[in-house]
Amino acid sequence: MTQPAKSTHTQPLQRKTIVITGASSGAGRAIALEFARYKTNLVLAARSAEALAEVVAECEAYQAKAIAVKTDVTNAGEVKELAQAAASFGGRIDVWVNNAGVLAAGEFARTPIAVHDQVIRTNLMGYLHGAHAVLPYFKQQQYGILINNISVGGWFPTPYAVGYSASKFGLRGFSEALRGELHQWPHIHVCNVFPAFLDTPGMQHAANFTGKYVKPAPPVYDPQRVAKAVVNLAQYPKNEVTVGSVATILKLVYSVFPKLSRSITAGVMETYFKSAPSLPVTDGNLFAPVDYGTSIYGGWNSQADQDQRKKLVKRALMVAGIAAGILLLQHKSD
């Protein structure tokens, strides 16, 4: 049995073995390339072999070692094979990044139940499959870092994306419970990342049952920020980090004004749907990979969006200040 690491986070990243699911586009692709800069051993997983081959080549340009393992995270057997391939490739597994995710937009009752099932299977069960596959290796080594890319959706519910919200809220419970079980393994870490809305192709990939053109609500952040946060956790693990000030603000606002937050969000979306261009219903990449949107960016971060972000951040900070004041008054009254 391998002796426990004296301190996981003080070891250099070079030649550590990193597994990343959902590595073919968006944040996953950005995470892979950021790790590649450290000349790591990368095991990249997604459903599209063609897109993964591109990422492998880009990582190798940084002198990282990389392999692609075509994997559907909804299939526990395939995820177990991914772990086996990673251990064979690197001799161990140091870091596992659960990142693969999907989105479905639409009124809950009018969205097919098979769509909700698939969102849960991918976003929630896919992460459980990853943890279940890698933990035996971590325990044998007596160290390892599991990183879950969750999103602000883990704190702030999204009307018209009920399955997505259920999966993200579920991930927080999964992580907390797993940490409890691992209390006797001080060098095995479970780390959660909560980014705000990102400029990735995720929205283009989304299943859409609204009949309307959908886009991420500004502010939209650079996925490179998530990549840097994940790499930092691989060096200095801690329970959770947020990416983007809006994520922290939304968490605070919802904790103080849950009903108002839900109502306002639903109202804003319903108003948008009334004027948004019409589009046909689509499953997106929910059940199979698509041949578009394999880059890191989704092209959402225009100058207009940046200007809108500044306005929204100012307004959100005002609301957060009010919320903080209310919390302080409640604390004093108690």
Image (tube, rainbow, N blue to C red):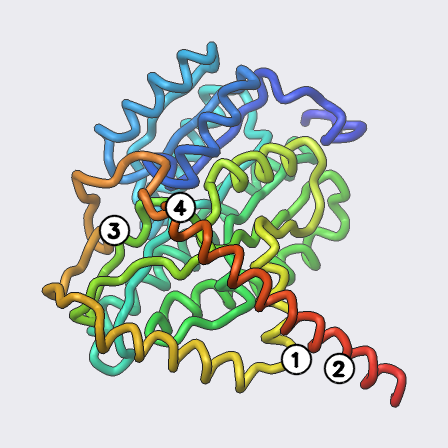
Q: Earlier in the sequence, mark 3 or mark 4?
A: 3
Whole-angstrom CA distance, mark 3 to mark 2, is 40 Å
SS of the residue at dot 1?
helix
| Residue at numbered disc 4 | 303
Mark-to-mark CA distance, 1 and 2: 8 Å
Q: Tell me, for residue 326, which label it has, or none.
A: 2
- Distance from disc 2 to disc 4, alpha carbons, whole Å, reads 35 Å
Quadrant of residue 212 in the image? bottom left
Q: CA distance from mark 1 to mark 3?
A: 33 Å
Secondary element at tag 4: helix
Circles 1, 2 touching at the beta carbon (< 8 Å) = yes
Q: If you read the primary sequence from the N terminus, does the residue marked by circle 1 or circle 2 appear first?
A: 1
Look at 62% across and 39% down and name the residue there.
Answer: 145
Residue 161, x across and y down, in percent: 35, 70
Q: Nearer the viewer, mark 2 or mark 4?
A: 4
* Mark 1 closeness class: few <14, some 14–19, many ≥20 residues within 10 Å: some
Residue position for label 3: 205
Residue type (three-letter) at the residue carrying disc 3: His
Q: Which residue is mark 1?
A: 256
Mark 1 or 3: in front is 1
